[in-house]
Amino acid sequence: MPDTPPSLDPAQLGAYFALVEVSSLLRHQVEQQLRDAGDLSFVQFQLLARLGDSPTGSQRMTDLADGVVYSRSGLTYQAGLLEKAGLVTRSPSADDERSVTVTITDAGRERLAKVFPGHIEVVQQLLFEVLSPRDVQALAALLTPVRDHMRSTPPRSAAPRRRRR
Amino acid sequence: MPDTPPSLDPAQLGAYFALVEVSSLLRHQVEQQLRDAGDLSFVQFQLLARLGDSPTGSQRMTDLADGVVYSRSGLTYQAGLLEKAGLVTRSPSADDERSVTVTITDAGRERLAKVFPGHIEVVQQLLFEVLSPRDVQALAALLTPVRDHMRSTPPRSAAPRRRRR
DNA sequence: TATTGTTATACTCTATAACTATA
DNA sequence: TATAGTTATAGAGTATAACAATA
């Protein structure tokens, strides 16, 4: 028996349900836009975007996996797809022979550019149409600490201590 | 060319990224808890929860599909799994012979009860640990209109007007 | 003719375990 | 021994199109 009988008050339930629904609906629309506009899944888009943001256009596999919530094998699969499509390259890292450095190609940047306006548009229409600048600030202020909290608590691709199934 | 060149200001980007990350991390953990505790996917949990909340314990397939963001065939698949597991029953609707009424069984309610405490616990720890009651109110107040807006804009399982691919 | 739901099918994605290679 | 990544494989989930039945 847990010490505190777990429960959520109505306000928490409301916030939780709204969050789930909003993110689910948003994700669904975004996914569709990315597929239509550039034949990318959201995960693939995230990977490309992450690489595109990086100053060098490169990142190690592990860092990508940590960033995008992934099993290593899942990342290998996605990286393979992106490489096959010519959007990234993979090469052994300079300093650590075990590591693989993933680098976005020009084609990858083009694809990103091709998809981005529509992506922004969807997010703008679905999410920000009804949020004032003040609301946006407030939302970011609320969710950023949550994000940091979630990130700090459980390791991601790290050591699988306890795992069943 | 769109009238407004689409773009997001830094605050919007921050809010968007935080939202995506938070919901992704939360979903991931919840998914795992539900699987471990009661061998349910999140979608299956949502379906059961929706039925459990309903006064009659029943809902039509279409209503479920609209609620949980689903293609009808996807819902048929999930309903089939739930039925096979004895957690719901399906029967032709009384008033409309075309419709199928899905009803949660006692076993379904038990499963829900079995899974719920752990579910709440995860949400509590991951999401609400760092949010004050005031924050929770604010978050709900921000996201609820967004949800309504998203719901009102595009039809869900409704008429597939324009669709490519 | 429109709506409700199912089926068949094909595909994408994800995870687990076993394995290789480097630190 | 621990870490980085890949492979094989198996399973879950999703969507599309064609279909049957009722409104």
Image (cartoon, coloured by chain):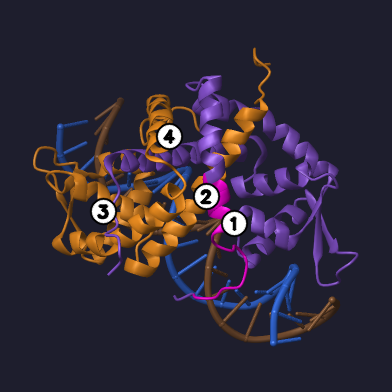
Chain colours: A purple, B orange, C brown, D blue
Q: Write the start and end of the magenta stretch as one range.
A: A146-162
Task: From this view, report whether residue A89 is shown above or below residue A123.
Answer: below
- Give the numbered dot on residue B139: 4
Q: Alpha-carbon neighbours of circle 3 within 10 Å: few (<14), some, or many (≥20)? A: many
Q: Is residue A151 highlighted in magenta?
A: yes
Callout 2 amino acid: Ser
Is A141 or C19 nearer to us in this picture? A141
- Determine the secondary structure under disc 2: helix
SS class, disc 3: helix
Q: Residue at x 38, y 59 (%)?
A: B41
Q: Label 1, on which residue?
A: A69
* Residue name at image x 46 percent, y 59 percent: B29
- Foreground label between 4 and 3: 4
Please report whichever mark, 3 or 2, sits nearer to the chain's N-terminal start: 2
The chain letter for the residue carrying disc 2 is B
Q: Circle 1 — which element?
A: loop
Which residue type carries mark 1?
Val
Extreme residue toward the top, this view = B3
| Quadrant hosting residue A69 | bottom right
Badge 4 element: helix
Location of the N terminus of chain B by quadrant is: top right
Which residue carries the number 3 mark? B48
Q: Which mark is residue B24?
A: 2
Disc ID at residue B155: none
